[in-house]
Every structure is written in C-alpha cells, then in structure tokens.
Amino acid sequence: MALADRHRLAGRIGARGVDGPRDRPRVWLVLFTGLLETAILLLVGTTLYDVDLPSDPGRWFDLAWIFVLGITACALLGIAISSVPRSANSASSVVVLPFLVLQFISGVYIAIGTIPDWMLTVGALFPLKWMCQGLRGVFLPESAQVLEQAGSWELGRVALVLAAWCAGGLVLCLLTFRWKDRREG
C-alpha cells in the first residue's frame, strides 16, 4: 500500500471516530449526562418524596463507585447490543422490550420480596439487578437488607459483578461493534 493511500485511509478512519478525537467528547457527554440525571433524581427525591440522602462519607463513596461501574457496564452493553438490530426500524423492538422486562425482574419497579426467586435469578445475570441492589444499600436503612434475596446488600459481590460486566461488555464491544459509513446505514 502506498504511503498516500495509508494517510488517506488513516484520515477516513479518524474521521469516522476510531481512536479519533471526535469521539472523546461523546464519552464525557455520557458521563456528564449520567451525573446530571442522577443529580436531578436526587433533587426530586429529596424535595418531593422526602428521600434521605446518605449521611456518612462511606455511603457517598458507595454511590460513586456503583454509579461509575453501573454506567460503564450499561454503556458498554448498549454499544454491544447496538449491532443486533439490522435497521433503525427494528431497533426499538429488539432492544427496548428485553430491557423493559429486565427492569421488572431486577427490582426496579417491583419490591424485591414480591418477585419469584427464579425471576430474580434470571435478573441476576445482568448488571441492572446489581446496580439496584447496590443503590438500595446506599439509600435504604440497614434494617431493610433482610428483604434482599441473600439477606444482605452484598456490596462486595455488587462490585465484582459490575466490574465483570464492564470487562465482559468491553470484550463484547470489541467482538461485535463495527463502524459504519453513513452510506451503509
């Protein structure tokens, strides 16, 4: 390959964002958006629903690492699953429905004690259940941990599972994600 061809190819790859500076702001945008949404949810929760914020620095630290690992795992999973739908029209049905079901079996909308054990086991295969469990450990009193499936918050296990999902999500992204030209769809 001629030197000029290599430079032209490198320019096209950079322009599409592979290791290019154009995608670095997107990473910061995801992080900023996640922080802003979290701040708004905390503000609404404290003002409208009398949610008690963590009172000790240890719980704030737990919130921080659960946030970072959770948003990273979910972002990587989202990137990996973006290769499944073959068109923009089918993306909604292929992606939204499974995630909606996961929200119900992971303790987002339904109290964890009312969900059958087999559903909780299925939900435990994905990061959302572990994020919810960790966040319950941050915001609920210690006496509420007996309502969990294991009888405790299991914050160590939450960290391990979310970290594993970050690593696995990265591998899935590397195996499945491909940059496409605008002409390709």
Image (cartoon, rainbow, N blue to C red):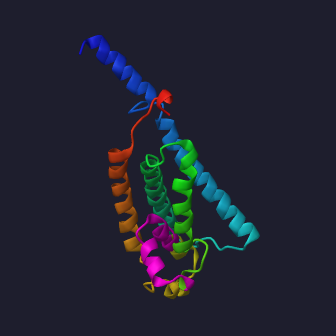
Tell me if residue 62 comes above or below residue 5 in the rendering.
below
> Where residue 26 sits in the image (x, y, percent)?
51, 39
- Residue at 29 percent of width and 18 percent of height: 6
Relative depth, front residue between 122 and 85: 85
Residue 25 lies, in percent from the top left, at 51, 37
The x, y position of residue 40, in whole percent, is: 67, 58
Q: The N terminus is located in which quarter?
A: top left
Foreground pick, 160 / 4: 4
Write the residue at 57% across / 52% down: 92
Q: Is most of the magenta stretch helix, strand or loop?
A: helix
Q: Is residue 168 above or below residue 133?
A: above
Q: Tell me which residue sits at (47%, 47%) in the image.
A: 82
Which residues lie in the magenta part? 114-134
Q: Is residue 153 visible?
A: no
Q: Is residue 120 magenta?
A: yes
What residue appears at the point 42 percent right and 50 percent down from the top-left corner?
A: 80
Residue 10: x and y in percent read 35, 22
The answer to whether residue 22 is visible is yes
Front position in the image: 146 or 116: 116
Q: Is residue 71 above or below residue 63?
A: above
Image quarter of residue 164: bottom left
Nearer-the-camera pick, 92 or 163: 92
Residue 130 among those drawn in magenta? yes
